[in-house]
Each structure stands twice: as C-alpha cells, then as structure tokens.
Image (tube, helix red, strand yellow):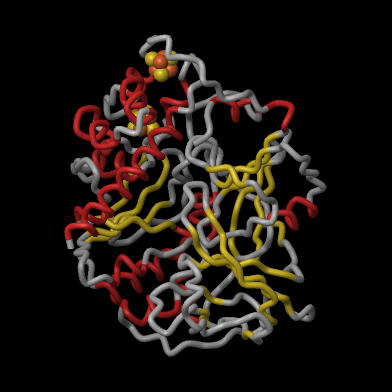
C-alpha cells in the first residue's frame, strides 16, 4: 500500500533482504498487562453473546461470539475480559476486539490448556488457526476447496522482512516435522518449499521439493511462485487456493509442529520492527501485545502524525492506532516519522507510462485507476484487468505523479467484490 516514501528509511532497493548468516537471539517482549485480540466476526447486538465483559478466561481457551460462530480466537493468557467492542479496518470491514487483562504472574512458560488434537485437519482447524504464522487451516479443512499442493514459504513476501528466513535458519527440524504433520493431516500429495537464493540453510528438506526464489522483488509473491516454479498462471480474480495451491509460512509450519508436540497452542510471534531511523529489531512478542508496548521497549516515541505500517514497504497497510495488536500474521511493523512522510498527491497523471512498464502483469494502471476513481468497477475489471493485479505495489512505487495507484487498485478490487456479493444476494 505504501509508495516510495518508505524508502527514505533505507537505501532505495528492490531486492529482498537476506537474513544475516548467524542471527542474534530474539529480543523477548514481556507479556503486557492488557492484551488485545481481534476476531473476524462483527458483534450482532440482537443476539446474546457467549462471552461478555468480566468473564474469566484461561490461557489457551477458545473464544467465540455465538454458538453458530465459525470464527474464533484463542486467549494467550489467563485473565479477565475487560472490554468487547467493534473494530473497523481500512476498508470499513467490521470485526470485534477483546481486551484481556493479564494475570501479572504469567510468563511465556505458564501452562496452557491442552487440546485433544487428532491426526486430521478438522481437529487442527478446531484449535490451531491462530498459531503464530496464521496457518491456513480453515482453507485446508474446507470441503469446498480441493488443495493438491502446499507451498511452505521461507522466502518473505515483502521487502525488508526476514522473519520467515530467520525461522528457516533456526528451526529447520521443526519445519520438517511440521511438513510431515501437514502431509499426514491433509493428505495433500505435493509439498514444496521456497528458499531465497543465497540463503544458507544447513541440511536439506528431504522429500520436499525446493524452489529457489530470485532476490528481485516481487519474485516471492504467490502469483510469481505459481508462474516461475509451478508453471501455473493465476487466472484473473482467482486465488492460489482456487487452483489447488495453498501457501503456508515457515513460521506457521513450525508452530504446528510445536502444537502437535505439546497438544497446546503457542502464542509467541516472531516479527521485525523497523524504527524511524531504519533500525531493525527482531523480536518475539505474545500475540495480542499492543504495538505501543513494543515501541516503549525500544524507546521509539510515536508522535501524532507518525505513520505506523503493518507489513513491509510495498504491501503493508497503515494503522491509525499504536494500540493495534500483534497478530498471528504480523511479520513486520514499520514506523515512519511525520517529518519525512512525503504527501501522496492528487496530481493528475502525466502519462509517463512508468506504471505500465513496471507492472508484472501488464495492466494499463493509469487508465484502470481513472475507472476506479469514477466508481466504474465492472468496467475496470472487464476492460482494464483489475482482477489480474497481483498486488505487488510496484506501480505506486514508480509513479511520477505520486498517485497512490496501489491503494486505488486494492480499493477497486474490494468494491468490485462487494458489488458482486450484493448482486448475488439480490438474485437469491
Ligand atoms: S497494478 Fe500495480 S500492484 Fe497490481 S500488479 Fe500491476 S504494478 Fe503490481
Ligand atoms: S506512473 Fe503515474 S504519472 Fe506515470 S502514467 Fe502511471 S499513473 Fe500516470
């Protein structure tokens, strides 16, 4: 989502970073006194919820809003729910957040509830969706989606992030164990793993097919892995799962291995925090830790108009609050000082053509965006390939007029999805 502005934090480059050869131990952030958990289901004020303010929760307890809810989260601590409220994301989608007051005596070693985990995907999906790395168990467990290839990603998707490379270099055995568990519980016949060119991993991956990915961005994006290594083209408007391929991060695979060993969920997320001067901190923090707590640890002071970005410089999204919590899939957090954020502009396109030349799927981005600006989403899809966008963010990075092209394209896809959902609902 972010354009050129981020590269004021570091030397401009479009190559992925490689994890250092002998990475330091992670800095551990203590469990905070209050944790915030997000649940991807909105509150329905007409129904009686299963959980309410004041309820006691145990570490490892599954939290759902209603009896019929398919979405859940897991409490990383034993404590008390002190707040339940609505959260809106950058597209206006609403979900729910809980604040859980932590029992102050807890450490990361405090015992968690154990689960009756069986060797099948339904059992894993029942308890382990929110493990660090966010394993896509819901997809793998779905009867409607037929997956025949799982790709484990040690190659980080966005620039500046080395979280999954770090995991690959430190937890190779757990990755192998997790891969065997995945095979056993899913029966998916083909397992592959992406490893960035130049990443030195001691030992091999046994029967897993290894894809060595190029260092140049965006070669680690799923659509590029499909094309370059699986000889598959992602059809417009489809996801990799739609064509039978499921991507899972190295960290998620390690988390699965640990969960099956202990019969309980883990909550420590590994992530990279990049401070205002570009200083990087690789840390582990409990899922639900508010970012503010992490910034305080490193004396990173957040001013009013500083920008906090969840994710990397090309695909990350800005959040308006430093209370935003560490999520199971938070790999990178960047902070940009208000004084060095260049304004995005509403300057007119100067027809330089840079966005078209750099787009990996040859979308005429400058024209596409005019249709999106005019709310003509169907036309944008039919005539100018809106749904072919692989969300690399390169168009916004190069735009001479500093038009937030990537943000427009994401918005366009979101609106198109809503429009079609509405049409389908009206037909039923
Ligand atoms: S439209 Fe932009 S974000 Fe989408 S694939 Fe092309 S360059 Fe990447
Ligand atoms: S890069 Fe920006 S200014 Fe150049 S053609 Fe594309 S939208 Fe227009």
Is residue 263 visible in the rendered image? The answer is yes
Identify whether 68 is placed above or below 166: below
Is residue 254 visible in the rendered image? The answer is no
Identify whether 273 is placed above or below 26: above
The quadrant in which residue 185 appears is bottom left
Instruction: Decide if residue 295 is on the left or right side of residue 125.
Output: right
In terms of image quarters, where does ligand 1 lie? top left
Q: Position of residue 308 (x, y in %)?
A: 65, 43
Q: Position of residue 383 (x, y in %)?
A: 20, 28
How many numbered badges does the structure rendering display?
A: 0
Question: Which residue is at a point 60% across and 43% down the rendered structure image?
Answer: 309
Q: Position of residue 114 (x, y in %)?
A: 52, 88
The quadrant in which residue 197 appears is top left
Question: Which quadrant: the C terminus?
Answer: bottom left
283 and 44: which is toward the camera: 44
Identify whether 131 is placed above or below 15: below
Q: Position of residue 52 (x, y in %)?
A: 60, 82
Question: Which residue is at a point 55% across and 54% down the rendered structure image?
Answer: 330
The quadrant in which residue 4 appears is top right
Instruction: Decide if residue 379 is on the left or right side of residue 23.
Output: left
Question: Which residue is at a point 24% across and 59% down the rendered structure image?
Answer: 425
């Amino acid at each position: 989502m972010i354009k050129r502005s981020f590269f004021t934090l570091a030397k401009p480059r479009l190559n992925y970073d490689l994890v250092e050869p002998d990475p330091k131990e992670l800095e551990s952030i203590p469990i905070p006194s209050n944790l915030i958990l997000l649940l991807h289901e909105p509150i329905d004020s007409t129904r009686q919820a299963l959980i309410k303010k004041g309820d006691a929760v145990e570490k490892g307890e599954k939290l759902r809003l209603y009896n019929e809810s398919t979405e859940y989260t897991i409490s990383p601590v034993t404590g008390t729910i002190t707040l339940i409220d609505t959260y809106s994301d950058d597209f206006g989608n609403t979900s729910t957040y809980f604040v859980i007051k932590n029992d102050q005596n807890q450490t990361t070693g405090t015992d968690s509830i154990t689960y009756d985990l069986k060797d099948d995907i339904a059992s894993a999906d029942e308890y382990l969706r929110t493990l660090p790395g966010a394993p896509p168990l819901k997809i793998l467990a779905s009867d409607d989606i037929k997956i025949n290839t799982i790709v484990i990603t040690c190659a980080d998707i966005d620039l500046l992030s080395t979280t999954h490379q770090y995991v690959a270099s430190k937890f190779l055995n757990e990755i192998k164990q997790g891969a065997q568990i995945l095979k056993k519980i899913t029966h998916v016949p083909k397992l592959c793993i992406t490893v960035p060119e130049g990443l030195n991993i001691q030992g091999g991956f046994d029967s897993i097919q290894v894809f060595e990915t190029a260092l140049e961005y965006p070669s680690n994006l799923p659509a590029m892995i499909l094309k370059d290594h699986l000889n598959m083209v992602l059809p417009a408007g489809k996801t990799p799962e739609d064509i039978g391929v499921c991507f899972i991060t190295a960290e998620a695979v390690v988390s699965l291995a640990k969960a099956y060993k202990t019969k309980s969920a883990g909550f420590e997320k590994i992530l990279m925090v990049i401070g205002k001067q570009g200083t990087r901190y690789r840390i582990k923090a409990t899922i639900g830790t508010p970012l503010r707590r992490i910034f305080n640890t490193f004396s990173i002071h957040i001013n009013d108009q500083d920008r906090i970005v969840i994710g990397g410089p090309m695909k990350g999204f800005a959040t308006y609050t430093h209370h935003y919590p560490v999520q199971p899939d938070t790999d990178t957090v960047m902070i940009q000082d208000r004084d060095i954020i260049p304004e995005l502009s509403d300057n007119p396109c100067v027809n330089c053509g840079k966005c078209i030349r750099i787009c990996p799927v040859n979308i005429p981005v400058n024209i596409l965006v005019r249709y999106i600006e005019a709310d003509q989403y169907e036309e944008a899809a039919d005539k100018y390939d809106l749904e072919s966008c692989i969300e690399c963010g390169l168009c916004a990075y190069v735009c001479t007029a500093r038009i937030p092209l990537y943000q427009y394209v994401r918005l366009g896809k979101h609106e198109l999805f809503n429009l079609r959902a509405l049409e389908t609902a009206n037909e039923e």
